[in-house]
Amino acid sequence: MTDRPLDAPTHADLDPSRRASSANGALRSLVAALGSVAVGLLVMLAAVAGFGYPPLIVARAFVASVLGNGDRIAAALVLACPLAIIGLAIAVSFRAGVWNIGGEGQYVLGALAAFLAAHAGLAQTPVLGPIVLLVAGALGGAAWAALAALLKRYRGAPEILTTILLNFIAVQVVAIAVHGPLADPLSGDRDTTASIPAAAQLPQLIPTAGLHAGILVPIALAVVAWIALARTTPGFRLRVVGDNPIAARFVGIHADRVAARTLMLSGAIIGLAGAVELAGNTHYLTAAYDAGYGYTAIAVALLARLHPIGVLPAAAFFAALETGARGLQKLPDEAFRDFPTVLTFFAQGTVILVTVLLTRMRISGATSP
Amino acid sequence: MNDVTVPELVASTLHRGVQAAVPLALAANGELIAERAGLLNIGIEGVMLIGALGGVASAWWTGSAVAGLIGAALAGALAALLFALWTVAWRRDQVVTGLAINLLAFGLTGVAVQRLDRFAESHGSTFVAPPLPMPAGIDPLATLTLLVVAVTHVAIFCTRPGLTLRAVGENPEAADTAGIRVALVRFIAAAVGGALVGLAGGALSVGMTHRFQEFMTGGRGFLALALVIFGRWSPIGVAIAACFFGLLDALQVTLQPTLGDAVHLLYPALVALPYVLTLVALAGVTGRARAPAALATPYDPR
Amino acid sequence: MLEARRIAKRFGPVVALADVSVEFHDREVHAVLGENGAGKSTLMNILYGLIRPDAGQVVLDGRALRLRRPMDAHAAGIAMVHQHFMLVEDFTVAENLMLGHLDVGWWLPRSAVRRRAREAARRFALDVDPDRRVEELSVGQRQRVEILKALLREAHTFILDEPTGVLSPDDAQQLFESLRRLRNRGARILFISHKLNEVMAIADRVTVLRRGRRIITESADRATPESLAQQMVGRPLGEFVRPPAPSSGDAVLELRNVSSARGHVALRDVSLVVRSGEIVGIAGVDGNGQTELARMVLGLDRPEAGDVRLFDPDGGRIEPAPRAVAHIADDRRREALVLNMSLAENAVLKHHTDATFSRRGWLNRRAIASHAAQLVREFDIRPASPFVAAASLSGGNQQRLVIGRELAAGRGLVLAVNPTRGLDVASTDFVHRRLSERAANGCGVLLISADLDEILRLVDRIYVIHSGRLTESRRAGDPARPTHDTAEIARLMAGLPPDCGGRT
């Protein structure tokens, strides 16, 4: 669970947080991340015990249910895919000092936009179909984030609040669409849509386990984001704005514009996650399509200490936690039949609290609402 | 629809509006107290949930709804103290800590209610709170809320502790050199504010539904954050804003039967309406309201 | 009598105070003189309970004090007027006066505070309206509020940390008057300063600190500015003075009748020219429109009326923009540096899009690192590594980095705002020489500074800014060596007309 694992030690590595004490600093980050995970797991086990489950049996069953067989691992990876993409988008926005808490809304809107593209018949050819869907999803997410960006830039409304409020609205927008124009006439209760055409779906890597090609998206995106942040001028400006928006203005960087664009970029990436999930995993929309990924992904980004590459193992960890909890319910032992998966939220909160405690992480930028 | 007269409809809407305004006003006032001390607690949604659960739990345990409300306030204060421990004692990022507390509370209350349901069942009872007594037909929660708003308003603007509170939120360094213990004031503000937010949760669970459901606050905590801005950090202003949103909520319930078959389609729109209006209001108001100068900034005495 | 007895304090490896003993008598103004880093602020903070000494004690009237928090100092009648005022801007004067008096019940004693404020105001020439909000007050008035705060706390010992640094000469005179009245009523006043002439004007006794040691304590009538200066610095003073070099070169900056109500202070009909080869100074008390003027020149704000014209070295007109001006910012940590980024990244903050440092959006990290290494050599920045975080540099080195970055580009206009505030003597000298050098090389320099001495030493022409208006003060006297009339400048800084009835 290193958060800066692929750090290339070149003589011209300029970022002091990486350079100054590359060995020492990286080690400390690694220890902090592992420490957060360990403490988070311990607290969760304590909670499990407190709620009357035998902690050791749970722990053993848990490990077995995550690592027990290939299918379980695949299931965790399928869940990790949207978490990693959204976590990456959130990490990028936090790096710019932009509080995008709107992952949930941008995610469902991205899925809706992708579905609409398929519904409109734009994705009928195999290879091109999924690509159309992904582009549509990114546009949908970006458009939803653009609302918050515009409110921030022209009306001064704090994005930390507007993105949250837009989550609640987005979920209802999808509900209206699914109940109304997009409802599948074959489903009696008008709560789901029809599936997108097979041509628009992402190819399966391991069909039996549901592992789809979308899993490659977060890996590629993480590498791109990592390089872009460290080595390109837009990435440089994004970091400047995140660390000191006032100085940014005084050296001629349009901090407001950078912040607004970052928010939309972040929305686009999250929308992409919605499209990937739709094209690779769910294939159709439901009236209550939100899955809480937008909130879990915040924990992913923070555990990764906002490093793009660190997001991948962090997402895998939280996904394993979730699938592990679900796996417990499927065990033959009667006692776990109703094991509360909502407990994973508790673990996410704990891990964030321990992470900020161990790393003094502070997200500067213009926060105040 | 046919056999209800218009005045009856108005009266029931008003009544429902007040009921819906109570948790909003309490939560927003609690957040206001914390923000006046410089603490921005995004975790207020979670604190409210914990209050709601703590309320039902203590009401069920003691068999008294009043004890339930007290339990709700205590649970809220405890949750807010966790926030203060991180942000004041250890000076950690307030937004990150608040987000963590939300997640923590979602998880904790979700599991706890399931176990408590099971526990109550095994003792041959159900995990619900008894109804609140209504002496002389007066809604005790609405009265309590009015009282809280009035007391908070007077305390903040006319008393010495209020002055101290505002100074800590505006310029903690100046307060420190004047001999005020900034950290202590922030802890107290967090606890008192958290108690009100917890009480808001209790009003929702003990006062209205009598039981606890997962995520039952449904974003009211986040709305309360916006209400503090609309009310311009003044308790009375915040209460008026809460009433407006409460009435809106009630109106939505009143209008539902008139929608007929379209309800299936339009119901989500009605649910989204308060959030849409909050967005619009935020766009209109933010520029003109001034937040406490030290909001969300940790104070580090050298 | 208040005594500091054998006080010692170190911060890590740095010795701030070594075995310092000073006696402060009743009924005296006792000036504590010293360079930056001499230990005067540390000593005062110890007397006020903000810092605990490693050794030694503070003794009041023969009784050792336990000073662990400012509250303990308050209890002993010790009050401090900080350099940065400790006032809540959003509060009224009266509310600020009531803050922190924990002994007076639940309700706010508004009328009593008002009455006592008026009374003290009359007695000690501390005129200020208790019902006005601090936000609306001038710097001099705010300082009076600070002294009132101490008086209402029934302080007997007043510590004033560089109290005149931000005042206009007029306000400083009024402050001295208040201090004299306080002393005559028995108060003990500790006056920290590094300005010799005002120390000579107000102090009864003087203590000089240098590098954490007490050099001397003597009666003010026996000291001379020269002797004190030598004791402060440890060597005879040789401050850099730039010979005037009036220029008739092309204008690099021209403001024509600029007005704007944006910002805290409205600019009113401001006209100004800076030519290549000259240094133009803008003198004035902080908060009279300097910030607004600088933002206008940088193109961060646009004028509502009038015209801001910037010219490149060839005489072509260019748009005012941060990248068109070499800007030495007022608050370098806030406005010029990204503290979490490396020295190298900060070195290209402004010009990272230049072809040397990036191509098609890709940063050329080799070029950036070698550019930074060059700045480090040329401007003697320490520690000499391009990769350290800017936060880990000392103030002087941060300023060298900013100056190196801004002056390296060699543009037409240099805008320097309080460029030596908070710097030690060596760094100040360095900054002054660099600015002078740029002017000699054909840049136009606009120096906005609250330090009148700095302006008088460096500039060719002086404008004075007050309440958003600019007035030029011309040299006069002997035509061969015309000098600036400092009395006139002082009047302009106080907002008085240049000549009031022939009095000086």
Image (cartoon, rainbow, N blue to C red):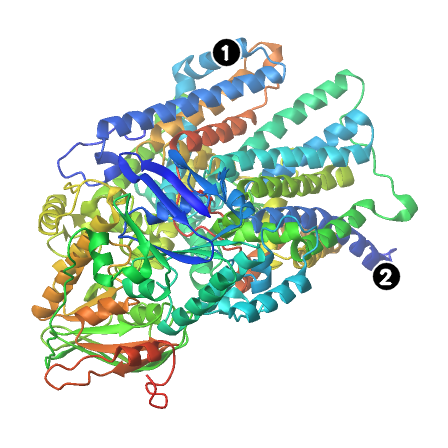
Q: Position of residue C11 (x, y in %)?
A: 32, 37
Helix, strand or loop at label 1? It is helix
- At 26% from the left edge and 49% from the top edge, which residue is drawn? C395
The x, y position of residue C37, in whole percent, is: 28, 47
Asked if residue A172 is positioned above or below residue C335 in the image, the reply reads: above
A184 to A331, vertically: above or below: below
Q: Secondary structure at mark 2?
A: helix
Furthest-left residue in this view = C441
Image quadrant in which you'd find residue A16: top left
Q: Which is more toward the observer, A126 or B4?
A: B4
Q: Image point 43% across, 47% down: which residue?
A: A99
In this view of the protein, which residue sits in the foreground, B135 or B282? Answer: B135
Identify the residue position indicated by label 1 in the image: A61
Mark seen at residue B7: 2
Between B239 and C248, which is closer to the camera in this rendering?
C248
Identify which residue is drawn at 40% across, 31% down: A303
Asked if labels 1 and 2 share a chain, the reply is no
Return the residue found at the far right: B136
Q: As shown in the figure, which amino acid type bears the numbered disc 2?
A: Pro
Q: Looking at the picture, which amino acid does disc 1 mark?
A: Ala
What numbered label is drawn on residue C72? none
